[in-house]
Image: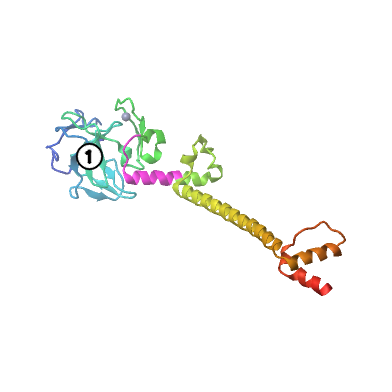
Amino acid sequence: MPPLTPHWQQPSHSDVQKVLYAAEKDSFTTKSISTVDLPPNAVFAKLAFPPCTLAEKATYATVQIGRDQHMNLNSDLVYINHGCVPSVIFDTSSLNVIVGPKGLKAGDELTFFYPSTEWDMAQGFDCFCGADTCRGFIAGAKNMKKEQLEGLWLNDHIKRLLEEKKAQAQGKNGQNLGNGTTTNGKVVRDEDAEDLVAQVLRQSLRQAELALQAAQKGLDTYLSHRATSSNGVAKGNGVVATQASAETLGRRGGEQRRGVTNRELSGEMGGDTKVAI
Ligand SMILES: [Zn+2]
């Protein structure tokens, strides 16, 4: 954390936080220590307005709380450093600082994962948190790789912005997607490549195809059944049909034909035959 000139009364959170200031004035080594034991998910501090105020733009001393919204903390909470295994979470939807999944013990350093709130930090930095899972170069979530953000708690506005960024990347590479091919040269799986809307539309299309197949099968079955029962009626139709068949056979010079067609059944052929007689 760069040196700040506090304009608030210090200490601001003496009940839960102790700020250790750097020995040298220009050093960036200010850090915060918890003075309390708290279980996972407990509220460590509230991000109330005031002392928080909306900020017109992002600075190194603001926390992003929405797509285009930032706030000045105006308290010692600003001295909570970044960590890749953070001890607290800045939940900007509930405006609470929440204890991380490991809980908090007095003496633990207070850290939160900066990209969990920040989308586009003006200045990234190399992290030296020392964690096995240290994410290396820390910038806003926009400028970090997917693997660097994996497994870390992120605020809703960051998740939404990441989804939008993914959708935009897919839009530019639309012709390559859907087959597990490439986005910006990286191999991606189908489920990564396809957004939710595309998946829903694809399911609808599949259902429409199945409905079409079912309708076609139904029509075929009906027509074949109708043809069968038509023949059955004709066979039992006695005089006219039989007579017509016989006469037709005679007229056509011994054509090997039994039964009647639908046209004959309708009476047309019978009528013709009778007129011919
Ligand atoms: Zn780190």
Tell me the quarter of the picture where residue 99 sits.
top left
Q: Position of residue 140 (x, y in %)?
A: 36, 39
Left or right: residue 119 versus residue 269 is: left
Q: Give whichever of 124, 65 is nearer the camera.
A: 65
Instruction: Report the amino acid beneath label 1.
Output: Ile
Say whether residue 157 is magenta: yes
Q: Residue at x 61, y 58 (%)?
A: 222
- In the picture of the structure, the residue carrying the numbered disc 1 is 98
Q: Where is residue 217 in the image (x, y as percent from the top left)?
A: 60, 53
Task: Tell me if I can see residue 238 in this picture.
Answer: yes
Quick one: 166 or 208, which is closer to the camera? 208
Q: Give the range drawn in magenta.
A: 151-166
Crowding at dot 1, Cα within 10 Å, few <14 / some 14-19 / many 20+, comes out as: many
Q: Which colour scheme is used?
A: rainbow
Circle 1 sits in a helix, a strand or a loop, which is it?
Answer: strand
Q: Does the residue labelled 1 lie within 8 Å of ligand 1?
A: no
Toward the viewer: 155 or 57?
155
| Whole-percent x, y for residue 157 in the image | 33, 46
Q: Residue at left 47%, top 47%?
A: 199
Give the quadrant of the C terminus: bottom right
Q: Position of 67 compared to 35: left or right?
A: right
Query: In the rendered image, which quarter is residue 97 located in?
Result: top left
Magenta stretch, main secondary structure, is helix
